[in-house]
């Protein structure tokens, strides 16, 4: 600290420093900047200072303040002999150092013999006591920042683990919303686009560009969306921001930038069900993951000349644990449960391809043409159709179409009035027309389901009579249309689960009561 108040009776020129860490704090509805200015003027009056310049730094963290244009201007200004000091509300407005390189800012005060004026007293960094006090205050400000970040992280983490959303709406997945009043998650109208994308993936179409154009989602975004388990009702958080000092990121002007994300350790991963009525069944989600995995660029299965040998990959599930069954080569071709492969406790044995596939061939050729089986399938379909509430879906889709048509009308009116140019009009209309086409098709699928008889199903499954004589490609095409989930364990076929959409009724969900028939 310096001398008594009497030493500063004569007015001396000073620069006022105001800094807020976020853009929100700089908003006109916030009192942070006016409060800092009021305190600074009181300090200047107390010590006989005349504020000749005010430097405001907004949206810049105390750890990156050196990069900001405002701080660079301050460092240049204090070199002038006419500037006696800098006025700030508190030391942390000057800096919150994360590393020792930030202390170069204090050296600039030493070399220019500039005094820092705070409400609790001035600090002269050029003398012994001021140098010691400045270093201590800087260290304390840096520690305060670390503690603030830790408290914020802990509070947000507690909310995540309880199934709440501590972040803003911009961080939510596509087609998902969170109501802060009720603290409930739900799907939005955009989720219908995601549902249709999963349906197209499950039918064997893994062309991201074609699917993206169909549902109105950019292909680069679609790949990320289809990997998110939130559409099965579960929120899985397996990554976090790196909080280490070395991971701090800022833009060239010192404004804050996002820290890089890193994988969480096993005990940090959060898995919690936040939506009771999922958009996609877990089985359909897992099948989509397998199909997308197989599509990876430069995948060995896509190489020219590769011989595709497995017929049922992507359509088998373990009858013991329910997980997806993968293909595996170890001196011979095998099917293996992913639960065993990833050492998750499943005891289903390896199954040789040449032994398992003929058994499935016989089952499909006999069961899908058996009248008793087809009768039970028709009964299961009728039960599921009664649960699907098509009238509710129809009203909701009609409402979405009405909103889109109204948006289209307003865009045309804006163009006619000369408020938007033709290129902007075309871009806006193109997006709306894609959504109108999609919701129109989905509405068509919501038409009342016709009566379904075993005889009609027999016509659908007629190709399975020749199943054992079809080529692998023909079998895969039929499987892509019917999309069965076949449950096997140790060469035994325990049951079959079929989606309702195979009979051409337009229903897009899967019967939750698994249709299982003994082999």
Image (cartoon, rainbow, N blue to C red):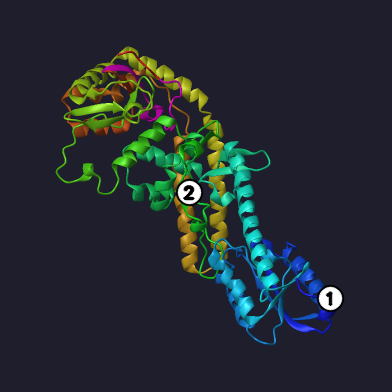
Q: Residue 463 in magenta? A: no
Which residue is located at x 62 percent, y 72 percent?
106
Q: In terms of sequence position, does the residue under pointer 2 or pointer 1 come before the other? A: 1
Looking at the picture, how far across and down is residue 20, in whole percent? 66, 64
Task: State whether residue 329 appears in this view.
Answer: yes
Q: Between 198 and 180, which is closer to the camera in this rendering? A: 180
- Asked which secondary structure carries label 1, the reply is helix
Per the rendering, the mark at residue 436 is 2
Q: Between 7 and 40, which is closer to the camera in this rendering? A: 7
Q: Between 478 and 335, which is closer to the camera in this rendering? A: 335
In the rendered structure, the answer to whether residue 103 lies left or right of residue 468 reads: right
Which residue is located at x 67 percent, y 63 percent?
137
Q: In the picture, which quadrant includes the N terminus? A: bottom right
CA–CA distance in space, label 2 to label 1:
73 Å
- Counting other residues with Cα less than 10 Å from the Cα at mark 2, is it few (<14), some (14-19), or many (20 or more)? some
User: Residue most toward the bottom?
Assistant: 81
User: Residue most toward the left?
Assistant: 305
In the rendered structure, the answer to whether residue 50 lies left or right of residue 82 reads: right
Which residue is located at x 64 percent, y 48 percent?
151
Task: State whether residue 418 appears in this view.
Answer: no
Residue range highlighted in magenta: 491-514
In the rendered structure, the answer to whether residue 203 lies left or right of residue 126 reads: left
Q: Residue 493 in magenta? A: yes
- Asked which secondary structure carries label 2, the reply is helix
Answer above or below: position of 109 versus 221: below
Per the rendering, the mark at residue 5 is 1
Answer above or below: position of 12 versus 493: below
Q: From the viewer's perspective, is the residue at label 2 or at label 1 nearer?
A: 1
**Image quadrant in which you'd find residue 67:** bottom right
């Amino acid at each position: 600290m310096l001398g008594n108040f009497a030493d500063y009776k004569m007015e001396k020129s000073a620069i006022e420093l105001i800094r807020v860490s976020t853009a929100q704090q700089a908003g006109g509805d916030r009192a942070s900047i006016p409060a800092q200015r009021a305190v600074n003027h009181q300090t200047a009056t107390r010590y006989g200072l005349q504020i000749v310049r005010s430097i405001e730094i907004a949206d810049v963290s105390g750890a990156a303040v050196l990069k900001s244009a405002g701080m660079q201007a301050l460092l240049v200004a204090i070199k002038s002999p006419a500037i006696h000091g800098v006025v700030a509300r508190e030391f942390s407005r000057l800096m919150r150092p994360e590393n020792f390189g930030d202390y170069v800012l204090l050296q600039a005060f030493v070399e220019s013999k500039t005094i820092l004026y705070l409400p609790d007293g001035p600090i002269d960094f050029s003398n012994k006591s001021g140098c010691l006090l400045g270093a201590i205050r800087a260290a304390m400000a840096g520690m305060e920042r670390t503690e603030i970040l830790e408290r914020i992280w802990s509070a947000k983490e507690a909310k995540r683990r309880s199934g709440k959303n501590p972040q803003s709406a911009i961080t939510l997945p596509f087609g998902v919303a969170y109501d802060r009043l009720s603290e409930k998650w739900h799907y939005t109208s955009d989720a219908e686009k995601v549902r249709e994308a999963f349906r197209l993936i499950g039918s064997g179409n893994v062309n991201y560009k074609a699917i993206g154009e169909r549902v109105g989602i950019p292909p680069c975004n679609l790949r990320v969306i289809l990997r998110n388990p939130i559409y099965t009702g579960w929120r899985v958080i397996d990554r976090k921001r790196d909080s280490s000092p070395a991971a701090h990121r800022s833009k060239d002007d010192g404004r804050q930038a996002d820290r890089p994300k890193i994988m969480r350790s096993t005990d940090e991963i959060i898995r919690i069900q936040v939506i009771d009525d999922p958009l996609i069944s877990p089985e359909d989600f897992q099948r989509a993951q397998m199909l997308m995995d197989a599509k990876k660029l430069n995948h060995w299965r896509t190489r020219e000349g590769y011989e595709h040998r497995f017929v049922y990959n992507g359509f088998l599930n373990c009858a013991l644990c329910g997980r997806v069954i993968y293909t595996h080569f170890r001196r011979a071709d095998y099917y293996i449960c992913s639960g065993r492969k990833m050492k998750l406790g499943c005891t289903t044995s390896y199954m040789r391809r040449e032994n398992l596939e003929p058994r499935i061939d016989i089952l499909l050729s006999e069961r899908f043409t058996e009248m008793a089986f087809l009768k039970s399938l028709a009964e299961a379909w009728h039960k599921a159709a009664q649960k699907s509430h098509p009238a509710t879906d129809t009203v909701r889709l009609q409402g979405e179409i009405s909103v889109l048509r109204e948006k289209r009308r307003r865009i045309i009116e804006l163009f006619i009035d000369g408020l938007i140019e033709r290129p902007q009009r075309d871009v806006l209309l193109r997006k709306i027309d894609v959504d109108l086409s999609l919701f129109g098709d989905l509405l068509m699928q919501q038409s009342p389901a016709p009566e379904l008889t075993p005889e009609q199903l027999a016509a659908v499954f007629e190709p399975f009579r020749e199943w054992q004589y079809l080529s692998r490609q023909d079998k895969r095409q039929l499987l892509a249309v019917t999309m069965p989930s076949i449950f096997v364990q140790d060469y035994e076929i325990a049951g079959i689960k079929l989606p309702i959409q195979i009979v051409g009724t337009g229903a897009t969900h899967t019967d939750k009561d698994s249709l299982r028939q003994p082999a």
